[in-house]
Image (tube, rainbow, N blue to C red):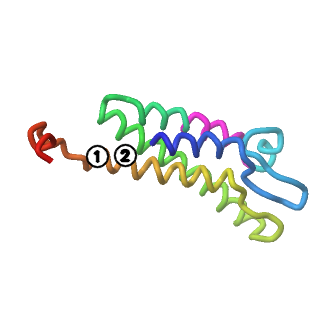
Amino acid sequence: MLWASIALFLGAFLPWMYTPLGTVSAIGALSDLMLDGQPGAWILYASFAALAAGVAPWRLFSVVNGFIVAVVAVGLPVYHLLRMWSQVGFAGWMPGPGVVLSIAGGVLCAIGARELLTLTAEPAEAAVRA
């Protein structure tokens, strides 16, 4: 989940869309017009939540927090991509690295939370013998 937090942090600031008029970032003045508010702020908050899930000593907290971050980090960029596609199609714009890193960070969080959920604690004797 630590790698996911880095991907989400970078995805919040990198351009989400390339258009003929320039790039559209998830944080900034153009994002108010193009992206219904500032989804980059939500992704930035999710990056810190993923960091907390990655370093927390409580397994249940990390699992729940990881799944919440995964839903936000995958759902928000996919919503904006589908919204842009439904409005103008694929003419004149292309997804940027920010949206790709945000989705990838969400997928990494989901994988990390699933791994923590399915992790079984093995006894100390078995770990020493191996």
Instruction: Identify the amino acid type marked 2.
Output: Ala
Name the foreground residue: 88 vs 100.
Answer: 100
Check whether the beta carbons of the residues at disc 1 and disc 2 lie within 8 A of each other.
yes
Which label was assigned to residue 15?
none
Q: Residue at x 79, y 50 (%)?
A: 24
Q: Residue at x 54, y 38 (%)?
A: 46
Name the foreground residue: 63 vs 38.
Answer: 63
Name the foreground residue: 130 vs 65.
Answer: 130
Q: Can residue 36 be seen in the rendering of this structure?
A: no
Say above or below: 53 vs 35. Answer: above
Mark 1: secondary structure: helix
Query: What kind of secondary structure does the magenta stretch mostly adopt?
Result: helix
Say which residue label 1 marks: 117
Quadrant position of residue 126: top left
Number of on-image labels = 2
Say which residue label 2 marks: 113
Mark 2: secondary structure: helix
Residue 106 picture location, percent across and down? 51, 50
Q: In whole angstroms, how far apart are the C-alphas of marks 1 and 2?
A: 6 Å
Q: Residue at x 75, y 70 (%)?
A: 90
Q: Residue at x 31, y 44 (%)?
A: 116
Crowdedness near tag 1: few (<14), some (14–19) or many (≥20) residues, C-alpha within 10 Å: some
Instruction: Identify the amino acid type marked 1.
Output: Leu
Name the foreground residue: 69 vs 125.
Answer: 125
The residue range painted magenta reads 35-46
Residue 127 picture location, percent across and down? 15, 42
Say above or below: 87 vs 68. Answer: below
Q: Is residue 68 left or right of residue 29?
A: left
Q: Quadrant of the N terminus?
A: top left
Residue 34 picture location, percent across and down? 78, 50
User: Is 104 within the magenta?
Assistant: no
